[in-house]
Every structure is written in structure tokens, then in C-alpha cells.
Image: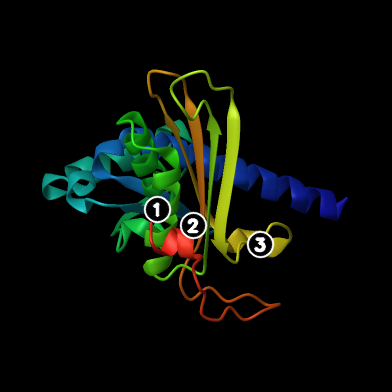
């Protein structure tokens, strides 16, 4: 019974984090929302939001962030939420921002393979230990069926608790010929795995010279 209660709490916390992330990504999309971290204590709920442009979230005299905190409090029935804003240091290591950039390029008609290879190279050149991009949908304009394309470089764990060390972002491209789903997974620089040590990663020539 105890293990079931712990599992239920874990699932509930994950769902709440997802809903808060979804809400904030809509509310502050223009600030370049990337991701959210949530830490619960008996007294407060700390919500750390990573964005490209903190000033747009904080607002003059802190009015914007105060309004956002109040809206979050009411929507999710929180007693004492505290939102802090952190500026994204490197957007190429933020999966949601990378996924949105890929979506924009697909909508502009850039070849999906060129996007895939070039983006993986940029992610790894910025210090990531692993990166994976998945595209699903109609990837070319004419006479094409729904297709799934997956490409990864470096180390990306697929199972176990270590998958929690992988950051993930999802976006949708809407070119005229049909929607394309995009998922980006990144292992940030300096990530420590209990079962292995990640050494220098050599990029495939196809990606290295993309």
C-alpha cells in the first residue's frame, strides 16, 4: 500500500509539473519560454522558469511576474507559489527552443535532412553529451506518406532512472503540406551517470560537415 501511495504521488507530481509547464509556456511564449523546475516544500512551492528574455516576464517594477504568480496560484490552487526567472545561457542546449527553431525552419521549406544534421552538430558543438531528434509527419511536399525519422549522436539513455537526466522538448511544424511533430532530447554538459563515464564524442562525418 505504501509503495502504491508513493507511486501515485510521483504520478500526480509529474502531471502537475506538466500542466504548469504547459500553462506557463502559453502565458510567456514571447519571452522565449524553455522549461520549468518545481520544488515543493511544506511551506512554499518554488517554480523556476527558464526563458530567453527575463525582462519580458518580470515587467516594470515586477508587475508582470506578480500577475503571473497570482494566476498560477489561482489556477493550480497553490497556497504560496514563488516564481523565479532564470535567463537561458545557451539556447542550443534547451530542447524546447531547439524544437521550435526546427519547426520554423521546416515551415520555411528548408530540407529536413539538412536541418536534422546541422542542428545535431550545433547541439554537440555546444557541449552536449548526447542529442536525439525525432520527426514524424509528411516530411516532403509532394507525393509523400507519413514518415518517422530518428537520429541521435552521443549517449542517450532509453530506460531506467537515468532517463530523468535527459532534457526533452516537443514542438509542431505546420508547413502547407501537413503537420510534422518534432521531439528533441539533450543530455546537458557535465551530466554524471552512475553506470558510465562519457568521454569525448566524435561526430559522424556526415554531421560534422553539415
114 in relation to 130, above or below: above
Relative side of 71 to 55, left or right: right
Label 2 to label 1: alpha-carbon separation: 42 Å
Rendered location of residue 41, percent (x, y): 53, 59
The quadrant holding residue 115 is top left
Assess whether mark 3 and mark 2 are in contact (beta carbons under 8 angstroms). no
Q: Residues within 10 Å of mark 3 (few under 14, many from 20)?
A: some
Mark 1–mark 3 distance (CA, rounded to whole Å): 20 Å
The residue sitting at the right extreme is 1
Residue at 26 percent across and 52 percent down: it is: 52
Residue at the (43%, 39%) spot, across then down: 112
Circle nearer the viewer, 2 or 3: 3
Along the polypeptide, which appears first: circle 2 or circle 3? 2
Q: Secondary structure at mark 1?
A: helix
Nearer the observer: mark 2 or 1; the answer is: 1
- Decide: is 120 above or below 194: above
Q: Is residue 29 left or right of residue 171?
A: left
Observer-nearest residue: 61 or 97?
97
Where 144 sits versus 206, above or below? Answer: above
Name the secondary structure under disc 2.
Answer: loop
Nearer to the camera, 44 or 121: 121
Q: Can you identify the residue that label 2 sits on?
A: 43
**Which residue occupies 37% across, 60% down?**
122
Q: Position of residue 85 (x, y in %)?
A: 30, 55
Residue highlighted by disc 3: 157
Give percent across and percent down for residue 69: 33, 42
Residue at 56 percent of width and 51 percent of height:
151
Amino acid at each position: 500500500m505504501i509503495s502504491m501511495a508513493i507511486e501515485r504521488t510521483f504520478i500526480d507530481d509529474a502531471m502537475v509539473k506538466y500542466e504548469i509547464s504547459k500553462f506557463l509556456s502559453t502565458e510567456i511564449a514571447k519571452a522565449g519560454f524553455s522549461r520549468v523546475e518545481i520544488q515543493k516544500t511544506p511551506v512554499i512551492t518554488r517554480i523556476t522558469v527558464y526563458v530567453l528574455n527575463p525582462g519580458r516576464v518580470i515587467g516594470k517594477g515586477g508587475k508582470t511576474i506578480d500577475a503571473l504568480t497570482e494566476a498560477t496560484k489561482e489556477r493550480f490552487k497553490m497556497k504560496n507559489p514563488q516564481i523565479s526567472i532564470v535567463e537561458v545561457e545557451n539556447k542550443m542546449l534547451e530542447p524546447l527552443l531547439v524544437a521550435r527553431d526546427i519547426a520554423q525552419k521546416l515551415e520555411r521549406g528548408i530540407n529536413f535532412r539538412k536541418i536534422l544534421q546541422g542542428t545535431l552538430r550545433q547541439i554537440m558543438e555546444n557541449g552536449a553529451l548526447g542529442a536525439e531528434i525525432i520527426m514524424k509527419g509528411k516530411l516532403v511536399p509532394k507525393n509523400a506518406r507519413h514518415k518517422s525519422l530518428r537520429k541521435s549522436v552521443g549517449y542517450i539513455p532509453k530506460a531506467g532512472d537515468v532517463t530523468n537526466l535527459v532534457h526533452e522538448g516537443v514542438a509542431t511544424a505546420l508547413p502547407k503540406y501537413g503537420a510534422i511533430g518534432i521531439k528533441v532530447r539533450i543530455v546537458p554538459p557535465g551530466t554524471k551517470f552512475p553506470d558510465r563515464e562519457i568521454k569525448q564524442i566524435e561526430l559522424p562525418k556526415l554531421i560534422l560537415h553539415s
